Image (cartoon, helix red, strand yellow):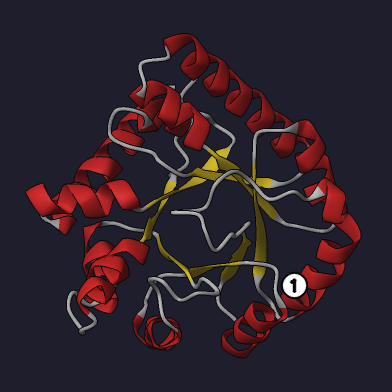
Amino acid sequence: MANTEKLRLGVNIDHVATVRNARGGAYPDPLRAARIAEKAGADGITAHLREDRRHISDADIEGLMEVLNVPLNFEMAATDEMQKIALRHKPHAVCIVPEKREERTTEGGLEVAREENKLAHFIAPLRDAGCRVSIFIAADKRQIDAAHRIGAQVIELHTGAYCDAYADGELDTHHDELDALREMATYAHSLGLEVHAGHGLTYDTVMPVAAFPEVMELNIGHFLIGESIFLGLEPAITEMRRLMDEARAER
């Protein structure tokens, strides 16, 4: 049976800032990318302000809060500094992610179960300020249960292992990871959590995940910024939007 409810697309603009910072100048401008993404059909903009500021800067967050007509999903580590920044800006949503200085990008999901008490206290002021709190986690029942207990409203399932297995031609692993994502999306939804997904999704991997009726939002960035080199940013996003809508309509 088709789920006709629109699946939201959040476009992550981190790597526009990565290219800008490679030369230390002002171009390309992530805010311009955000406006193009809006025009192309993005339902929200995602930006990760890392502790090391390797891509998105504090000024980018300031600018996004001023110019966006769609919600900002502010990705951040669970640190006092980031909590203060989020409380100052009060974005529509904050997504708590793991962060290591030596990593190239966010690797794996947040370990919620081992840090349950700390994270519960960390997110409480964000919820009180009106931010919608999301936790970026692996497709793991233990982590989903912990995210539910600490009061998160949303979980974002890490799709990286599923996408990596596809890219490496490991089809059995790819199917196993997809099954795990499907099962955990259903389980999280049964707890009353809103389910999002993201990390590593491409034109080749997005449709099976987009077809999950419980998933309400996909956050996609690196692939779209890379594809924009060849197609342009607006056409790259438009094609992703088309594939998501097609997958949703077929179920």
| Residue position marked by numbered label 1 in the rendering | 127
Looking at this view, name the residue that lies furthest to the top.
172
Residue 62 left/right relative to 144: left
Could you tell me which residue is drawn at 72 percent across and 80 percent down?
A: 80
User: Which secondary structure, mark 1?
Assistant: helix
Taking 217 as reference, is 200 left or right? left
Q: Residue at x 77, y 32 (%)?
A: 141
Q: Is residue 13 shown above or below 86?
A: above
Say whether residue 250 is visible: no
Q: Nearer the viewer, residue 226 or 209?
A: 226
Q: Is residue 96 left or right of residue 205?
A: right
Placement of 62 over or under 114, stated as above or below: below
Q: Give the percent coordinates (x, y) of residue 160.
A: 48, 37
- Label 1: how many residues lie within 10 Å, few (<14), some (14-19) or many (20+)? some
In the picture as drawn, the residue positioned furthest to the right comes out as 117
Asked whether, in this view, residue 102 is left or right of residue 34, the answer is right
Q: Position of residue 3 (x, y in %)?
A: 48, 31
Figure quadrant of the C terminus: top left
Q: How many marks?
A: 1
- For the point 78% across and 50% down, the residue is 112
Asked whether residue 84 appears in the rendered view, the answer is: yes
Q: What amino acid is at disc 1? A: Arg
- Up the image or down, 155 lies above or below 98; here it is above
Q: Residue at x 45, y 76 (%)?
A: 53
Nearer the observer, 214 or 113: 113
Residue 104, quarter of the rendered image: bottom left
The extreme front residue here reads 102
